[in-house]
Image (cartoon, rainbow, N blue to C red):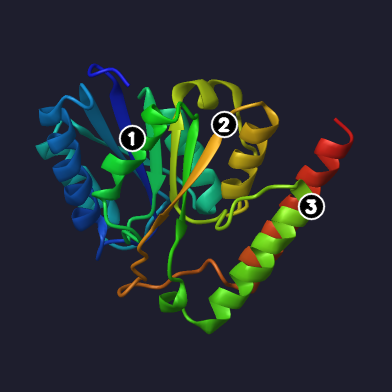
Amino acid sequence: MTSDALLSIFFPMWNEEAYAERAVEAARTVCRELVDEGAIGDYELIVVDDASTDRTPQIADAMAAADPHVRVVHHERNRKLGGSIKTGLAASTGDYVLYTDADLPWEMGELRRALRVLRTYEVDVVSAYRLDRTGEGPLRTIYSFFYNGLIQLMFKTRLRDINFSFKLFTRQVLDVVHPVSESSFIDAEMVIRARNAGFQILQIGVDYFPRTRGISTLSSPSVIWALLRELVTLRRELRHP
């Protein structure tokens, strides 16, 4: 990893007024430290506002106005997680691109380790998994167990926590891999397509911090149905390219 590398971090946000400032500030603090250490040359922080109906757009715009490292992309209509991630990927210009959630499910200092692993082991993707998932509640733990097992069975992956929002990509991956999912299946789609394209993926374990404010919609029936529908679509595509 060269010291002049640009790091992009983007946050999909829908009604995250309780978390927006904290998320961007945590990322900014770590990025400044990485610049001072010579690990990166510069950074950009991108908020993807998914047509929020609370104060998230105003908060994000104010942060961008105060700091040239911060940019905001607004959706005119709600595009869910998949659409927001695709927007974030398209907006990111860095040599390394990190995607994560605004509620900071992992401590941002882990980014330093992820970058070091990416460089030391010469891999293309670092995908994190939760060391202890009990904080997310029994229902979501059960959902995740079966979902990860289904992905492993259908796509022959070895990733332990494929939907966890801590994925660090090199620019080479993003120049080749172009996801189409609109649902939260996009997490799996990205790493499956990267693996199939020959890119190397390495996993690291991190401590998990569950959401304490706002409402997660990732376990709603409509989200699960959309996820399963896109899972089947990708399976068919890969079997009959």
Spatial CA distance of label 2 from label 1 is: 14 Å
Q: Residue at x 49, y 35 (%)?
A: 125
Disc 2 target residue: 200
Q: Residue at x 67, y 58 (%)?
A: 227
Instruction: Give the image location of residue 185, x and y in percent.
Output: 63, 52
165, above or below 179, in the image: below
Secondary structure beneath dot 1 equals helix
Secondary structure beneath dot 2 equals loop
Instruction: Give the image location of residue 86, x and y in percent.
Output: 52, 38
Residue type at mark 2 is: Gln
Closer to the chain start, of discs 2 and 1, is 1
Disc 1 target residue: 115
| Quarter of the figure with residue 43 | top left
Q: Is residue 226 visible?
A: no
Which quadrant of the figure contains the N terminus? top left
Q: Residue at x 21, y 24 (%)?
A: 42
- Looking at the image, is mark 3 or mark 1 nearer the viewer? 1
Q: Is residue 127 visible?
A: yes
Label tally: 3
3 and 1 marks in contact (CB < 8 Å)? no
Binning the other alpha carbons within 10 Å of mark 1 as few (below 14), some (14 to 19) or many (20 upward) gives many
Instruction: Give the image location of residue 180, x and y in percent.
Output: 65, 38
Instruction: Give the image location of residue 136, x and y in percent.
Output: 45, 75
Q: Is residue 89 left or right of residue 19?
A: right
Residue type at mark 3 is: Met
Spatial CA distance of label 3 from label 1 is: 30 Å
Disc 3 target residue: 154
64, above or below 162, in the image: above
2 and 1 marks in contact (CB < 8 Å)? no
Q: Residue at x 48, y 43 (%)?
A: 85
Of 137 and 110, which appears nearest the observer? 110
Binning the other alpha carbons within 10 Å of mark 2 as few (below 14), some (14 to 19) or many (20 upward) gives some
